[in-house]
Amino acid sequence: MKVAILGGDGFCGWPASLYLSEQGHEVTIIDNLSRRAIDEELGAESLTPIASIEDRLAAWNEVSGKHIGFARIDVAKEYDELLDFLRTEQPDAVVHFAEQRAAPYSMKSSRNKRYTVDNNTSATHNLLAAIVESGRDIHVVHLGTMGVYGYGTAGMKIPEGYLQVQVTSEESGTVDQDILYPSNPGSVYHMTKVLDQHLFAFYAKNDELRITDLHQGIIWGTTTDETARDERLINRFDYDGDYGTVLNRFLMQSAVGYPLTVHGTGGQTRAFIHIRDMVRCIEIALENPPAQGEKVKIFNQMTETHRVRDLAELIARVSGAQVALVPNPRKESPENELHVVNETFLDLGLNPTTLEEGLLHEVEEIARKYADRANLDMIPARSLWTSSNAAGEPQTAR
Ligand code: USQ
């Protein structure tokens, strides 16, 4: 299959590009290298040393004998270039990762909020409009987020995108309907993925585009079989307060001897998926597109749920790390339950990688290997959701 990966230089896009290339797909990466520019803006680097996109692609060719193409296009701004690419390259599918993906970054200031909304919604809408204008039948696989739903349960498991409701009125009696599960985003970033959902629903209905939206949980791990094949193929490892995600941050903190930064009571329950399962899910989604005219296919791309403090306690137990309870910089429920339906991927053959000590050690080992590159000043989360919740320095709980 001919696949274009928008955002193929990023944390999920890069390992997904390599995996799909390894499986024999013809892959082209489209990226504006914005994630590297944000590193510079924040003064925060990936813990792992990432090679330039040119060196990455040359290294992949060297170790695998396979070719991945690259086009530097800003999908949110360079519509004509995107359209031209779709017309000349004629991909069968586009995987869309080309969005600003950090909730804390999106909440730092009005500039960050506006950038995140402008960039993410323009990227998505430009892609959809360009596919229509190209006149081609191109399946879109989009990386969405579990955070579109919020993290409550309403007494039920969160379904895969749609809620079946019955509406009763005097005129039409009782009518069954599938509606998008009510959204409840917790950050401007998560909200952009809610807006994406509505763009997808419209284009699937009006233009009969074939679209799959993957509502992904928090990734943990950084390495796949492909990124491990050569140091120049190494994936990013974000640990800073904006881009680092919770479990990878805890593992890095444990490796460098920094108390694990549990926000609030750590009672937040979230959905997780290992990075190796993420790349497999992308392939499964590509292989199972909706029919033309069918509504958007929505999969919950997660394999397990965990409470933040349980993760911290687990890592403390296996590695001797200290746990710190820090004031929560975010506005979020201090404690929540979370139950999620994820049957589609399991039925389609995903064999989940569950949290186990071996893999935790693997991530910690990578963090230890590059510990001398760590800047401990970048660890505290300093992006505040509201002016009333000041984040302080870690307070050691044990
Ligand atoms: N947290 C801590 N300590 C930390 C970092 C985070 O307690 O040092 C807590 C947060 O307060 C939050 C939870 O851990 O309650 C998750 O935070 P996170 O930074 O790991 O994840 P989040 O901001 O939700 O975003 C990440 C990705 C995003 C993706 C999302 C999936 O950056 O791209 O969409 O996970 S989900 O969380 O399921 O919405």
Image: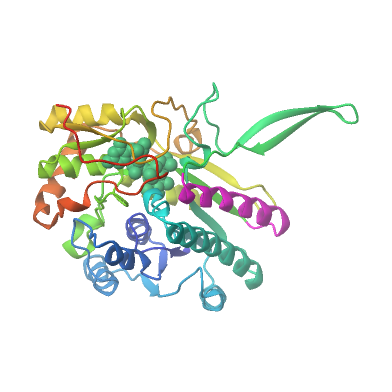
Ligand 1 occupies quarter: top left
Q: Examine the image and state in which quarter residue 181 appears.
A: top right
| 328 w.r.t. 297: above or below | above
Please say whether residue 199 is one of the residues in the magenta stretch: yes
Relative side of 213 to 28, left or right: right
The spot of residue 258 in percent (x, y) is: 14, 41
Total numbered circles? 0
Q: Nearer the viewer, residue 317 or 213?
A: 317
The spot of residue 342 in percent (x, y) is: 47, 34
Residue 280 shows in the view: no
Q: Nearer the viewer, residue 161 or 47?
A: 47
Relative side of 366 to 183, left or right: left
| Residue shown at the point (26%, 31%) measured from the top left | 311
Q: Nearer the viewer, residue 99 or 358?
A: 99
| 171 w.r.t. 254: above or below | above
The spot of residue 22 in percent (x, y) is: 33, 59
| 362 w.r.t. 310: above or below | below
Relative side of 264 to 333, left or right: left
The spot of residue 108 in percent (x, y) is: 39, 53
Q: Main secondary structure of the magenta part?
A: helix
Relative side of 355 to 125, left or right: left
Residue 99 shows in the view: yes
Q: Quadrant of the C terminus?
A: top left
Please say whether residue 277 is one of the residues in the magenta stretch: no
| Residue shown at the point (40%, 49%) measured from the top left | 103
Q: Which residues are magenta?
A: 187-209
Q: Nearer the viewer, residue 37 or 383?
A: 383
Q: Residue furthest front?
A: 388
